[in-house]
Image (cartoon, helix red, strand yellow):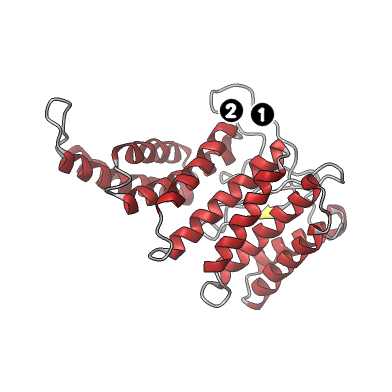
Amino acid sequence: AARRYRTALAGLPAGTEAAPDPAADLDRALVSKALGLALLASADLSRDTQALDDAVTTLRDVVDRLDRKADGRTWSLAQYRLGQALYRQDLLTDDGDLLRDALNAFQAALTAIDRAKTPVLWADAKTGFARAAQIIGRESRNAEILERAVEACRAALEERNRERAPLPWAATQNNLGSALFLLAHIGGDMALLEDAAQAFTEARDLYQAMGAERQAAIAARNLARARGVPPEADGTGLTGDVASGPDGGQRGAGPAADGAEPKQRQPMWFELEDTAAPDVTRASGSPSPPSPDGAPPEGTP
């Protein structure tokens, strides 16, 4: 698919500074958006890092070319997918700048998405924002950012309800539990631990009812940790493990984006979920208080 879009793009006319052609530029932006989405899908399926890099470059170009006011729906979708691609790049590189760019892309998408017309996309963008915000909040020990992650999860649950979208609902419950757990430790309100445990319980029970064994196990492990059960005691063998990125490598051990020495992040044991890429898991961990627990995510629908 990506090859076809590249061919189509090469055959399209383009305006110049001397003779701008808004219609041609819009056509190129639309084909480029399709190319970016194809590259992102290819990167998810094949763990192709070059396709992921190309997706980011292409989608950045698309949002620069499109007019937010005139092409709001296409622009917001491109921003959302750019956020996804940047988030996945961060999984591979631990580049905090990429994660902040992902957060900004999700925020930008939300400014243009019409919730009434596209509630699913709106909820997906809220979920993407919450995942990125959790990592940034954890690493900066910023309770305000974590509060925004909690708010975003709860907002997404207004559209991702249990009846209409059970699996996305459960994934968001799992991620809400992680955000609440982090906020409890970093913000100092330990009463939130019970809310975190409740969210993990909701996720586990739904997954079990639907026969989603892998996701149920993730939520069950998170629930055990939220209740203070050491990782050694729950049989997962995740003690001190770094989260796996989409290439099966270790979170925190990937090469830096500029080829510098890899950045080492603290181990993260909590596991968050992404209904868009259910096989790409990311774990985060819970140091004993007063140190906060980690809480990274997986991806978004």
Q: Between residue 243 and residue 116, name the one nearer to us.
A: 116
Secondary structure beneath dot 2 equals loop
Distance from label 1 to label 2 (Cα)? Answer: 7 Å
Instruction: Name the residue beneath numbered marker 1.
Output: 263
Where is residue 181? Give x, y as percent: 76, 54
Q: Is residue 239 above or below residue 234?
A: above
Q: Residue at x 58, y 66 (%)?
A: 157
Where is residue 229? Give x, y as percent: 87, 58
Q: Are marks 1 and 2 in contact (CB under 8 Å)?
A: yes
Q: Is residue 273 visible?
A: no
Q: Is residue 59 above or below residue 38?
A: above
Which quarter of the figure has residue 73?
A: bottom left
Which quarter of the figure has residue 264?
A: top right
Secondary structure beneath dot 1 equals loop
Instruction: Name the residue beneath numbered marker 2.
Output: 256
Where is residue 13? Give x, y as percent: 14, 37
Count neighbours of disc 1 (C-alpha within 10 A) and say few if under 14, some if 14 to 19, many if 20 or more. Answer: some
Q: Is residue 97 visible?
A: yes
Residue type, numbered disc 1: Lys
Q: Residue at x 42, y 38 (%)?
A: 56
Q: Farthest residue to the top: give it.
A: 260
Q: Residue at x 46, y 51 (%)?
A: 110
Which quarter of the figure has residue 118?
A: bottom left
Q: Is residue 256 above or below residue 203?
A: above
Where is residue 2? Give x, y as percent: 32, 46
Residue 141 shown left or right of residue 279 in the figure: right
Residue 85 shown left or right of residue 91 in the figure: left
